[in-house]
Image (tube, rainbow, N blue to C red):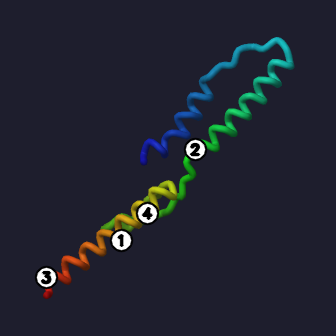
Amino acid sequence: MNAVRFLPLLMLALAGCAQQATIDSHANTKAKATNKATAAAKADDNKPHLICQFTKPLGSNITKRVCRTPEEIKAAEEQSQEAMRHMERSSNQTHQ
């Protein structure tokens, strides 16, 4: 999760350090800008959409930002429900 948090900063630092070659014609500049915009739009489609929530870890009053994809959230919910079912089944078997 820490890598996700620092990725935009890294990209910004790399973009600031990059140098663009001088382009002689205006047509080439416009064509490159169009290609970059198209590539950026395609990259946005491939990026997973994250849902961020602020949670308090157990035993702490300090909130923590947690970002996950909808698929990760659904998998965690299903895992929690299965764990509760397992606990209920095992407690019912010991009381019989």
Q: Which mark is residue 47?
A: 2
Which residue sits at x=51%, y=39%? 7
Q: Nearer the viewer, mark 2 or mark 1?
A: 1
State yes or no: discs 2 and 3 in contact (Cβ < 8 Å).
no
Label 2 to label 1: alpha-carbon separation: 28 Å
- Give amino acid for label 4: Thr
Whole-number angstrom distance, CA of label 3 to CA of label 4? 38 Å
Q: Secondary structure at mark 2?
A: loop
Amino acid type, label 2: Lys
What residue did someone put label 1 on? 81
Along the line of sight, the residue nearer the viewer: 92 or 72: 92
Q: Would you say the residues marked 4 and 2 are in contact, meaning their CB atoms lie under 8 Å apart?
A: no
Residue for point 25% across, 72% down: 86
Mark 2 closeness class: few <14, some 14–19, many ≥20 residues within 10 Å: few
The quarter of the displayed image where residue 58 is located:
bottom left
Residue designated by label 3: 94
Looking at the image, tell me whether mark 3 or mark 4 is earlier in sequence order.
4
Q: Residue at x 81, y 18 (%)?
A: 28
Question: Answer yes or no: do the residues labelled 2 and 1 have beta carbons within 8 Å?
Answer: no
Residue 88 horizontal/vertical position (percent) = 25, 79
Q: Quarter of the image holding residue 90?
A: bottom left
Residue 53 falls left or right of residue 85: right
Seen from the viewer's position, the closer of residues 72 and 21 is 72
> Which of the two discs, 2 and 3, sits closer to the camera?
3
Along the line of sight, which residue is nearer the eye, 72 or 53? 72
Q: Tell me the residue that label 4 is attached to.
A: 63
Give whichever of discs 2 and 1 has the lower sequence position: 2
From this view, report whether residue 53 is shown above or below residue 15: below
Please identify the residue farthest to the right as the structure is shown: 26
Type of amino acid at the residue the image marks with label 3: Thr
